[in-house]
Image (tube, rainbow, N blue to C red):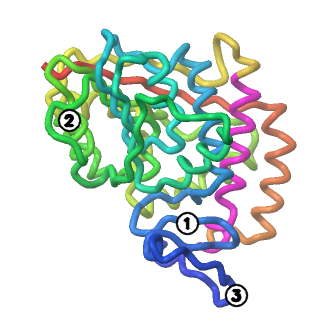
Amino acid sequence: MQFFGWFRRKPSEKHEAPPSARGRWTWLSGKRILLNTPYIIPKDVAEGNRLDLQHHLLKVVAGGNYRAPLRQPQAILDVACGTGIWGREMALEFPRARVCGFDFDRTSMDAALARLGPTGRLPANFQFLEADALQRFPFEEGSFDFTHARFIAGFVPADRWPAVVAEMVRVTKAGGCIELVEPVSNPQSPSQAFTTLMDTVAQLGQARNLEQRPGDRLMEYLQQAGVQRVQQRRFVIGMGRDAQRQRRLFAADMLAFVKQMEPVLVRTGLLTQERYTALLKEAESEVPRLGITLPIVFAFGRKL
């Protein structure tokens, strides 16, 4: 089943994109949908808030923002950076480094800037660029000591992973590190309603040829791209150290995610509005009590 027309507006939806953005996104039941990209999640302020929550969750799980053995990097790149929160924190951790993040769409970044308010500011050593990670990166070869990408499986088709990783390697200096962070599977929960919602989202990903188990192949992608000394660290969200805190954060993250996906799941016909509403209500009741787990992998190595 294909869903290439799921983003088309009904005549009653009269929201207009500004002239500079027309052709890049549209509106669907009040949610902002990106066009000309495999990305299936509505991209708006609510999604930016969820991504920041997810960022803090991953820090709790992994004990920090990265697992690669860094040695005072002077230039750091975050691929498909979203709100830019990872890059901003790295800029503070390495104040002498030049940190750059880029993303296909700057909505999440602009929302993050708005949250900082008039008294807040970006670190002086952090820069954001608008660029497409599925195209050639807008940087010269060997520009960065550390090149990082996290949870990009939501828009990278399975057959494009080698090219994206090859670009990450190209822009990394000899001796520099490359790191990928991805889940191994869909989140797992005893809640059948939540599982049904996530299985339905997975159908959208399959229709767009998105990698369904990216974490299992990260080491392979790095090795194919010529990265040396490849290692991985595996964590399970919702288990181990700070498990209760992880479960609380992850429940909030994933319930926000399925709410974001409502107009997409309904418009494609994968779920009726009544069915979606019933599943969401059940998931909201069960997930905080029953919990969710998700295995994730940090894979990293060096360009020699």
Mark nearer the N terminus (1 vs 3): 3
Q: Is disc 1 placed on a helix, strand or loop?
A: strand
- Mark 1 — residue? 33
Q: Residues within 10 Å of mark 3 (few under 14, many from 20)?
A: few
Tell me if I can see residue 60 in this picture: yes
Does 265 sit left or right of 208 as displayed?
right
Q: Secondary structure at mark 2?
A: loop
Residue 168 painted magenta: no
- Residue at numbered disc 2: 171
Residue at horizontal 43%, vertical 40%? 213
The magenta span reads 246-268
**Kind of residue sitting beneath label 3:** Ser
Residue that mark 3 sits on: 12
Check the image and name the residue furthest to the bottom. Answer: 11
Label 1, label 3: how far apart the Cα atoms are:
16 Å
Measured along the vertical axis of the image, is residue 235 above or below residue 267? above
Question: In which quadrant of the rendered view does residue 244 lie?
Answer: top right
Horizontal and vertical percent position of residue 217: 33, 34
Q: Amino acid at mark 1?
A: Ile
Q: Earlier in the sequence, mark 2 or mark 1?
A: 1
Rendered view: 147 above or below 175 = below
